[in-house]
Amino acid sequence: MKRWNSSLLIAAGLVCGVGGAYAQRGERDWDAERRRMVNEQLRGRDIRSARVLDAMLRVPRHLFVPEPQRRDAYSDGPLPIGHGQTISQPYIVALMTELLDPGPDHRVLELGTGSGYQAAVLSPLVKEVYTIEIVQPLGLAARERLVRLGYTNVQVKVGDGYYGWPEKAPFDAIIVTAWATHVPPPLIEQLKPGGRMVIPVGNVFYQQNLVVVHKGKTARDLRTESVMAVAFVPLTGARGSATR
């Protein structure tokens, strides 16, 4: 995929978000800021999926960002959400979603719920979203936020995502929003034949690459596609770099 090989984008950050009528006196016009984000950062680059662009336009990113960072919710970069974690750059969220190629009848697994923003973007695109967060305060807060905002087809689990969610498997697609040193075998097993996984793979000493894993008829029948260099926070869990 030549169009994504030109630059290193900061995805989930190393340190360092339902819009309404916010154009009233004294309030930000969040809808206008979201439209500008979609037109300039996404459509203005190489995001082509009309479904993905529509989802990014509908989800109120500012409601997934902590209050101190809310003014920068639609800026072109990641933002801290606490506990050493971040909400990814809007372009990276859109790119990974487009690479996942979600269908209306798909059941999708996400590793690394964070604030819940990626799950919210996937929600209108698929049948069901299952998302796992290892940091308990983030997972509980994301669950409450997603319920409050009406994302009824998203289920949040607090736990180590390295092992996936076998009770809910198999999945049509899997998305991992933090970098791993390798593709976790349990995730390959839980991916349906013909399914795909989008995951950053790398090493703390080497470059991370955003990889699309295509699964054939069996877990041994895999094809990987390196898309571009990225920089994500690491997965953490029982297996070291496992899930954030």
Image (tube, rainbow, N blue to C red):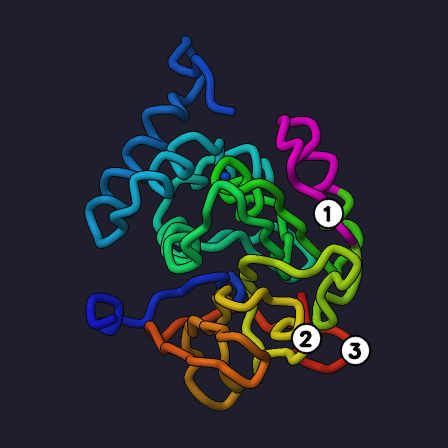
Residue 187 is situated, as x and y percent measured from the top left of the image, at: 64, 71
Residue 156's disc is 1
Q: Say which element carries label 2.
A: loop
Q: Is residue 227 rendered to the left or right of residue 180?
A: left
Task: Note whether 50 is above or below 228 in the view shown.
Answer: above
Q: Are marks 3 and 2 in contact (CB under 8 Å)?
A: yes
- The residue wearing badge 3 is 238
Q: Quadrant of the C terminus?
A: bottom right
Name of the residue lying farthest toward the bottom = 205
Q: Which residues are magenta?
A: 141-157
Q: Quadrant of the N terminus?
A: bottom left
Question: Is residue 1 shown to the viewer in this render?
Answer: yes
Q: Is residue 195 rendered to the left or right of residue 2?
A: right
Q: Which of 24/186 is in front?
A: 186
Residue 242's disc is 2
Mark 3 packing: few (<14 Cα in 10 Å), some, or many (20+)? few
Q: Residue at x 57, y 40 (%)?
A: 127
Name of the residue lying farthest toward the front = 217
Q: Residue at x 70, y 56 (%)?
A: 132
Task: Note whether 160 is above or below 96 in the view shown.
Answer: below
Q: Say which element carries label 1.
A: strand
Residue 192's disc is none
Residue 81 is situated, as x and y percent measured from the top left of the image, at: 61, 50
Q: Amino acid at mark 1?
A: Val
Residue 74 picture quarter: top left
